[in-house]
Image (tube, rainbow, N blue to C red):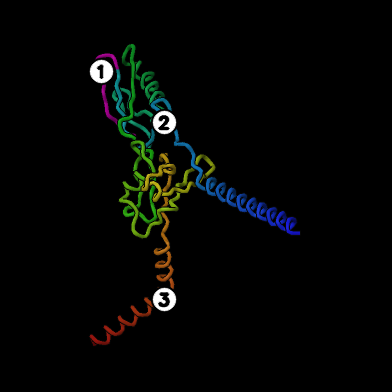
Amino acid sequence: MRRETAVVRSEGITSGLTVVCAIALMGLCAVSCATRQMPPPVRPTAATYVVGSPDQLFVTILPDPIIERTAVVRPDGKISIDLIGDVAAAGRTVEEIAQDIEDRVSRFKRDARATVAVTASQSISVTVFGEVRDPGTFPLTTETRVSEAIGLRGGTTIFGSKRKVRLIRTNGETTEVFVVDLAGIQSGDLSSNMMMRGGDMLVVPPNVLARVGYGLQVILFPFQQILSAGTGLFTAAAIF
């Protein structure tokens, strides 16, 4: 009997350990899935970058007399070039713009060659809002990661939740949401410090302290109005 009891207990312990291990494994899988990060997006090259307003372009037209112009893409998506006037730029690559300029300038200059370079990329922007000191939108002119984007907006306020920052990214008709651990990044874990892409939105949600404060504000709002009205009546009565 004792041996059978020992065997049963051993089997029970083994089964219990199996269940615990399974639960732990499921928990690790859930955490890894929740924090799974996509690889950093590939930055557009000169050949694939699509120009937009208000990007700044530098246009060179050869041969002599050489024409060199700095042009800013207007809201209508065009730039103005000597000899040919307005040229469509928005929605095109620099190679497509240069080819268009060459074709049109060739009527005035033999063996015309044109080059176009983006000197200031202002059309690709990202938005940071929520519990940051200076929420807003800014152009993505250089390679910028999540922590840098938040830093450019003054960093988080004391009411910001650093564990659940959300990166919202739209790809055509689909939208992806990534959870960024800003506290982990500040501690040296850069696994969630993703590269920003044009059109991205970063949301820093309120922490527990802020949510409690906002909840109290909603509850006390009607009483604040009553107290304000009562103070106004008391002041008016005192005047008269």
Which amino acid type corresponds to the residue marked 2 in the rendered image?
Pro
- How much space separates mark 2 and mark 3, taking CA atoms? 53 Å
Residue 96 is situated, as x and y percent measured from the top left of the image, at: 41, 24
First in sequence: mark 2 vs mark 1: 2
Residue 150 is situated, as x and y percent measured from the top left of the image, at: 35, 48
The quadrant of the picture occupied by the N terminus is: bottom right
On the image, numbered disc 3 is attached to which residue? 222
Residue beneath the point at 45% across and 53% down = 164
Residue beneath the point at 42% across and 47% down = 201
In this view, the residue farthest toward the right is 1
On the image, numbered disc 2 is attached to which residue? 44
First in sequence: mark 2 vs mark 3: 2
Note whether residue 169 is visible.
Answer: yes
First in sequence: mark 3 vs mark 1: 1
What secondary structure is marked by label 3?
helix
Residue span colored magenta: 62-73
Which amino acid type corresponds to the residue marked 1 in the rendered image?
Ile
